[in-house]
Image (cartoon, rainbow, N blue to C red):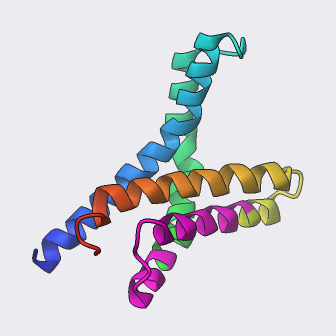
């Protein structure tokens, strides 16, 4: 595979991973609604809210923390199926810390767990979409 195709695959995988992480919470909310575990809001409202408001947090976090960590991991050769999600989880944790520094009223432990977990999920998606065929 030539370098240009590889860069395109990584860029598409990057966007796909962000999309997967943006859908994770509303899908979980829709499941909770269908099982009767939640009565708050609606499934379609949750999906719309996360697809509109989620990129406000996800894109800057991915660009500021995810891309440099990916480049570092690529340089170190740490692109296996378990290393990429750990790096993406670290990216989410760094984003949570940055958000807490900007607004100290945000409850840090919950934000660390949420952003770290969504980072791990997006790292799995990124590895699956862009790297699984290219890394031994």
In the depicted structure, whether residue 36 falls above or below residue 23: above
The region drawn magenta spans 69-96
Residue that extends furthest to the right in the rendered view of this protein: 105
Residue at 34% in and 56% down: 128
**Residue 100, horizontal then vertical, whole percent:** 80, 60
- Is residue 44 found left or right of 132 in the rendered image? right
**Residue 95, horizontal then vertical, whole percent:** 66, 63
- Residue 49 visible to the viewer: no
- Residue 62 visible to the viewer: yes
- Is residue 127 found left or right of 30 in the rendered image? left
Tell me where residue 49 sits by quadrant.
top right
- Depth check: give the residue in front, 78 or 103: 78
**Residue 130, horizontal then vertical, whole percent:** 29, 62
In the depicted structure, whether residue 50 falls above or below residue 89: above
Secondary structure mostly seen in magenta is helix
Where's the C terminus, which quadrant?
A: bottom left
Tell me where residue 74 sits by quadrant.
bottom left
Residue 111 falls inside the magenta stretch: no
**Residue 98, horizontal then vertical, whole percent:** 73, 66
């Amino acid at each position: 595979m030539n370098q240009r195709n590889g860069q395109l695959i990584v860029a598409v995988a990057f966007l796909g991973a962000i999309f997967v992480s943006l859908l994770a919470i509303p899908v979980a909310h829709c499941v909770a609604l269908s099982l009767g575990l939640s009565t708050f809001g609606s499934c379609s409202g949750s999906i719309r809210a996360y697809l509109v408001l989620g990129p406000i947090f996800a894109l800057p976090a991915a660009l500021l923390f995810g891309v440099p960590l990916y480049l570092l991991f690529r340089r170190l050769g740490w692109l296996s199926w378990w290393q990429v999600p750990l790096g993406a989880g670290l990216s989410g944790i760094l984003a949570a810390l940055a958000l807490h520094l900007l607004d100290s009223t945000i409850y840090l432990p919950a934000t660390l767990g949420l952003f770290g977990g969504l980072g791990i999920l997006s790292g799995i998606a990124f590895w699956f979409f862009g790297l699984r065929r290219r890394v031994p």
